[in-house]
Amino acid sequence: MNDFSSGTQALVLVLFTALVTVTLLMCVMAGPDRDDLANFYTGYLSLTPLKNGLAIAGDYISAATVLSTTGIIALSGYDGYVLAVSTALSLVLLMFLLAEPLRNAGRFTMGDVLARNMSGRAVRIAACLVTLTATLPFLVVQLSGAGSLLTFILDIPFAAGARTACIVIVGTLMIIYAAIGGMRGTALIQMIKIVLLLGTSIVVAALVLNRFDWSPGDILRAAQHGSGAGPAYLQQGLQLGTSTGGRLDFVSLQITVILGVACLPHITMRLYSAQDVPAVRRSMSWAVGTVTTFCLLVIIMGTGAAALVGSQHITAADPHGRTSVLMLSQMLGGAPGSAGATILYSAVAGMVFITLLSSVAGMTLAAASSLAHDLFAHAVRRGQAEPRTEMTVAAWTSVAVGIVAIGLATMVQNWDVGVLTTLAICIGASAVAPALTYSLFWRGFTRTGLLATLYGGAACALLLMVFSRAVSGTPSAVFPHADFDLFPMQSTGLVSIPFGYLAGWLGSRLDHRRRAADSREQRRRYEESEARLLAAAE
Amino acid sequence: MTYADENRYPPSAQPRGLPPRHETYGQNPWPEPYGHDAPRYDSYGRQAPWDASYAHETHRDDADLAALRSAYRLLRRISTLTALGSFVVYVVLSCYAPGLMGSKVTGELSLGMALGILQLVVTFAAVFWYGRSAQRSVDPLARAVRERAVPAGRHAGMAR
């Protein structure tokens, strides 16, 4: 697979160690005071818009985005281009629709936004559960991917033990970042990551274009040839087929991505650490600019991988093409063993490594914050917890979430669990997005409606996902030999997003009928807090 | 700014900010029947008959807030629907009009690819436009609401 000399491996290892050392040092130095909650959750609101924007972009571009999207472009061409566009536009939608009211309504976690007008612990518990169901699958899929990627990069012979060791090492680092660094520490890592990621991607994309004398026509011709699909490479349908069902599935997947990705709690959490509304707007402008640039680069890199590496080699290494960036960099560097090849490969390997580390750390922090703030401080202690206790709990929940994620990732490392990414995005689109839009913009939204949206949307997405074709019934499914694909699609958005919105509406109507006094009270609270929601007026 | 003496307001009639949660429970401060199209801002007229200047202030507050709300709503609708709509049209065309999207623009570049990349490039302009429009239409109104709310907010004694 990886015909590199030991010199390259040594350089890669040195680079990894250097990255780990530097980021750990920064985490310890930037770590929060031990008894200040606002500092732990938001980093004192002290980040400038540029820095916060880079951190948002860093959280947004997960390892799954970098590796899977490049792979899908390399293998499916046009379908991958559409995915890159929808990934970028999802963040744009977050900026236009939710970012500013979210910043005003939120404090530390998603539970703070949803529970701001509603009393009772059930809301907090629901918010925490949905945060967990949205972040844990994402976390597990990236950790288990980290195992196979690191063994590929370091060229460790295939053995279950080696992969488990890689998962445990990455998982331990991620726990340390999240528990010690808090929001400020992870923001620093995200900034380093996004700068490295953009820099390396620009170099790789420039090398690809240079190889073809900067002629897009030549690259596309070579990509059509290399993918083995011919003109079909530049038309929709390679990923999910061109049948009616396949096309509907494709539309559903894209809509789910554009609504769901940016709503995930580890991304919205970064918005609360902006100083004021103009700052959150500027942060989001930087984040959108960075992410869009990166998506353009991903399109070039993926097409380059199809053109230069060829789909046969890519699928031989990984059926989903997740190693295509690495293989492309091997191809571009020149003769194996030359200085250029060694440096380029090490740089790309380092970029993949830091992307993996930072994205899992961000998700662990989001899950742990929700557990500590929503579940412990507000649901268990009813808002009476000492800040110091809450911070200790947050550190320990990071450890707990990390250990659970490591355990699950080790268990599923031999399965093809890419479906978990889809699951997380589907839950984001069908539970988190409806809950946030209703809660921020509909004064008639009630507690029953909120609970129905959160539980109904998440349960619908989860249930349909289990019976979808991504889990069983197709050769690329998790269980290719089993056959319980009652729901004939790969993603659930087409059904579960309308279901989530409908559940919220019906639940609220029910409250208006049955508990008119309660729902009037909630409406009154919404209107009283509207000045704060729209203008940040206290 | 001309504010009436704050201390004359009875504590149960805080016009702004989050009041202490327990205080108004069960008092039903919302006399008209509930409904989606219930008039939203007619309560201030009957709420505080004891002080004409107070009602006047509240009126201006509400007018400011209503202006801010509709400015935000307009901006949000235009920007969100444009972004979402153009993308949905793009995806649906890609799926159900492959002939059109596959037609070559220049060289190997098809219309579908060109539109996809165009959307990414236009994103930069859209974000810039959004920032400018928000600065013009929303920010001044938000500042007005905030400035009016500061004395009342302090009076209510609530912080975030």
Image (cartoon, grey):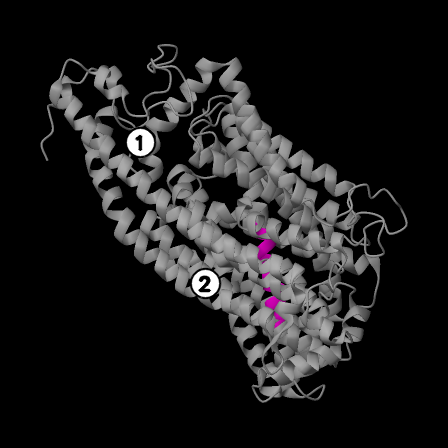
Looking at the figure, which quarter contains the C terminus of chain A?
A: top left
Tag 1 secondary structure:
loop
* Span of residues in magenta: A347-362
Q: Specify which label sits upstream in the sequence, 1 or 2.
A: 2
Residue farthest to the top?
B27
* A350 in magenta: yes
Q: Are marks 1 and 2 on the same chain?
A: yes
**Nearer to me, A170 or A232:** A232
Label 2 crowding class (10 Å Cα cut-off): few <14, some 14-19, many 20+? many
Determine the chain carrying the residue at label 1. Answer: B
Residue for badge 1: B159
Quarter of the rendering containing residue A220: bottom right
Residue A164: x, y in percent?
77, 55
**Nearer to me, A215 or A309:** A215
Residue A328: x, y in percent?
68, 77
Residue A433: x, y in percent?
54, 41
Residue for badge 2: B123
Looking at the figure, which quarter contains the N terminus of chain A?
A: bottom right
Residue A443 shown left or right of residue B119 in the figure: left
Identify whether A289 is placed above or below A327: above
